[in-house]
Image (tube, grey):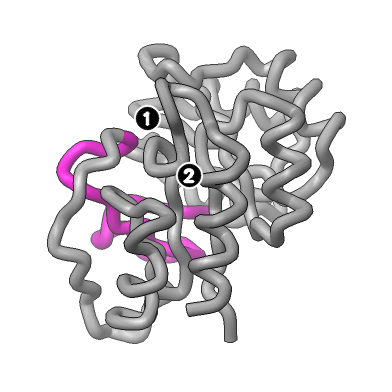
Amino acid sequence: MAVAVKICGITDTGVARAAWAAGADYLGLVFYPLSPRHLAPREARALAEAAPGRWVAVFKDPTWQEIATVLAEVPVSGVQCHGKCPPHWILRVHERGLLAISTHLEETGADVWLLDGPQAGSGQAWAWRLPDDGRPYWIAGGLNPENVAAVVRRIRPAGVDVSSGVERDGKKDVGRVVRFIEEAKQA
């Protein structure tokens, strides 16, 4: 089974369409105000409607009201929560029929656990070792088109997630996005 690929921090329709055409499984919309990839809900909705697919709403330290506001406005397939997450957020996401991606191993019930580098979204590499307890893990942090195939072959994660590793000068580079997807899928 091919590894799932998520390209996070999408802000441009052209990049989104190229990623879908190349075989991305998920694209991430960032709702953390301090991120340079942050979108307002109306911007995210316009992007998701212009390039339909399986979008994931990505939050850091949100309240449930912040998550619910986005879910009411933006057509997403899942929610990814970093930092301090609201109580019972996974249950509430599941009640809406959405995928829950947790960055906290101690949170039970998530559909996927995303293991990221020392600072989420920084592109910093880490040891890339997965716990061996049978849960579906995705990895992030320090991945790029040049190393993703070797990492996938070596540790066999259920998925990979990238943002800054496919950028040039702080913007998504379509060529790097497409190459990342191809390298991950062919590994």
Identify the secondary structure beneath mark 2.
Answer: strand
Task: Using residue 148 as the reference point, say whether residue 83 is left or right of it.
Answer: left
Q: Residues within 10 Å of mark 1 (few under 14, many from 20)?
A: some
Q: Which mark is residue 80?
A: 2
Q: Earlier in the sequence, mark 2 or mark 1?
A: 1
Residue at left offset 27%, top offset 49%: 142
Identify the secondary structure beneath mark 1.
Answer: strand
The magenta segment: 100-121
Q: Nearer the viewer, residue 93 or 163?
A: 163
Q: Amino acid at mark 1?
A: Lys
Image quadrant where residue 63 sits: top left
User: How many labels, in total?
Assistant: 2
- The correct choice, above or below, for 181 with respect to 149 in the image is above
Image quadrant where residue 72 sits: top right
Q: Position of residue 24 (x, y in %)?
A: 65, 57
Q: Position of residue 124 (x, y in %)?
A: 21, 43
Q: Amino acid at mark 2?
A: Gln
Q: Nearer the viewer, residue 117 or 149?
A: 149
- The correct choice, above or below, for 70 with respect to 54 in the image is above
- Which residue is denoted by mark 1 in the rendering? 60
Q: Main secondary structure of the magenta part?
A: loop
Residue at left offset 43%, top offset 48%: 162
- The correct choice, above or below, for 38 with respect to 115 in the image is above
Residue at left offset 77%, top offset 36%: 75
